[in-house]
């Protein structure tokens, strides 16, 4: 049966954090955040203040690292078991939001191991102990509305996207004053992550009449606002925060494709931020997929007002526009130019591509792909040659 699932409530706008005070039936809030950015910006204090004002006791778990580990997840889950919250509030980038979602699973089900929930749709029912509110501080992953949590196994350097509608948050709070403190590079990387979500969702095999309009609107808003947001325009930052969430609503239901399969495996191995991997991969993945869904890419290009008459010309225009966007955002277009050596690639390409084929995102890519083809796509993203097969 086809399904479309979103959080029950999405609060948005400046100072939306204050909406937490509406959660009057909750008594104990467990707050999860990253390093120091939310404290520095004053957003952590504000969150604690609002929760206390609403009569809640709070407990803080700080220090979730970028690309959170399985160890961090179990550490947080243990603290949750001791504190026994009925509300979990995650505030920060995709990393603390994702970590908090996984902690939630092991808080509600301490008997489970990470292996038990690695495969899509294997998470047992949640919400017997707590509900979940997410407050994103970057404009990219949309973890605040998605059914995903990306956790890294550092013993193997593999990222696992946990996927189940059980971990779709109950409440998303898009406070547009929070992303204003993002530095330029983070704005660029997370913005390209959001664009990749929307474009992959628009062609994904699980796309639907519900996910398509969200994806198209997100793509158009991102093209309108990402460059201005990068240059620090306040209004554009706010528009990007909403646009990335539209993309998230779409891809959480339509799923993704092989740009994400490869980003999950190369990001961990080459230590390149998730959004930067997607920015590199997206043009090559469009070229590969265009064999089977060129008319979909042509629709995107037409929506953006890009030049071309035939579907092929329009798809080429889309690839060109993404490459130009990367240049404007100072993102180098290949893995080589992002510091990966030929030796490192050759050493790991089999491992990366075998695992990328097994990544759950591959199953929803519009064109099936073998390990050999995955290696060719990755090689093109390393050298910069067009994908022509
Ligand atoms: P992260 O959460 O990893 O944060 C990256 C850095 O940005 C951190 O150093 C953080 O600092 C800093 N930061 C965050 N917000 C701000 C801000 N407003 N101002 C200043 N600095 C800030 O970044 P992303 O949001 O890009 O998340 C990436 C992760 O999400 C990856 O692991 C990726 O795989 C995953 N992901 C999840 C998806 C999902 O659906 N769940 C989808 C796509 C990706 P500090 O730690 O000090 O707060
Ligand atoms: Mn992503």
Image (cartoon, rainbow, N blue to C red):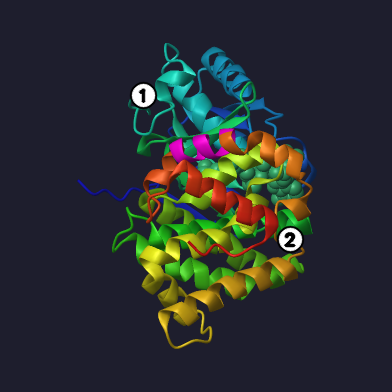
Figure quadrant of residue 155: top right
Residue at image mark 1: 128
Name the residue located 37 percent from the left edge and 66 percent from the top edge.
293
Q: Quadrant of the N terminus?
A: top left
Q: Main secondary structure of the magenta part?
A: helix
Q: Secondary structure at mark 1?
A: loop
Q: N-terminal of the two: label 1 or label 2?
A: 1
Camera-nearest residue between 6 and 16: 6
Camera-nearest residue between 146 and 327: 327
Which segment is the magenta one?
351-358
**Position in image of residue 57 (x %, y %):** 58, 26
Give the number of the disc on residue 109: none
Q: Is residue 249 visible?
A: yes
Q: Which label sits in the foreground, 1 or 2? A: 2
Give the CA distance from mark 1 to mark 2: 44 Å
On screen, residue 371 above or below 209: above
Residue at image mark 2: 331
């Amino acid at each position: 049966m086809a399904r479309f699932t979103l959080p029950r409530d999405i609060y948005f706008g400046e100072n939306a954090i204050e909406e937490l005070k509406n959660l009057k039936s909750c008594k104990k809030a467990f707050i999860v955040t990253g390093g120091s950015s939310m404290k520095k910006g004053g957003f952590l204090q504000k969150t604690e203040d609002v929760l206390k004002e609403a009569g809640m006791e709070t407990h803080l778990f700080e220090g979730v690292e970028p690309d959170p580990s399985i160890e961090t997840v179990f550490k947080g889950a243990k603290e949750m078991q001791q504190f026994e919250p009925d509300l979990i509030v995650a505030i920060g980038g995709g990393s603390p939001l994702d970590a908090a979602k996984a902690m939630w699973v092991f808080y509600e089900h301490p008997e489970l191991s990470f292996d038990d929930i690695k495969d899509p749709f294997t998470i047992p029912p949640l919400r017997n102990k707590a509900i979940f509110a997410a407050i994103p501080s970057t404009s990219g992953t949309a973890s605040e509305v998605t059914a995903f949590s990306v956790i890294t196994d550092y013993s193997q350097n593999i990222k696992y996207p946990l996927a189940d509608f059980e971990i779709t948050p109950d409440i998303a709070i898009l406070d547009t004053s929070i992303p204003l403190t993002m530095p330029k590079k983070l704005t660029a990387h997370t913005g390209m992550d959001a664009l990749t979500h929307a474009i992959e969702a628009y062609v994904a095999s699980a796309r639907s009449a519900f996910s398509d309009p969200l994806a198209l609107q997100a793509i158009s808003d991102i093209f309108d606002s990402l460059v201005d947001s990068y240059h620090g325009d306040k209004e554009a930052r706010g528009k990007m925060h909403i646009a990335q969430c539209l993309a998230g609503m779409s891809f959480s239901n339509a799923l993704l494709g092989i740009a994400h399969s490869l980003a999950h495996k190369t990001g961990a191995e080459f230590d390149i931020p998730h959004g930067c991997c997607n920015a590199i991969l997206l043009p090559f993945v469009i070229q590969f997929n265009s064999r089977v869904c060129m008319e979909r890419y042509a629709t995107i290009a037409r929506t953006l007002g890009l030049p071309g008459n035939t579907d092929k010309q329009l798809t080429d225009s889309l690839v060109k526009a993404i490459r130009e966007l990367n240049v404007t955002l100072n993102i180098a277009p290949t893995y080589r130019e992002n510091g990966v050596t030929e030796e490192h690639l050759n050493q790991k390409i089999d491992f990366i591509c075998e695992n990328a084929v097994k990544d759950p995102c591959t199953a929803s890519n519009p064109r099936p792909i073998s390990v050999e083809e995955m290696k060719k796509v990755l090689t093109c993203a390393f050298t910069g040659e067009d994908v022509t097969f």
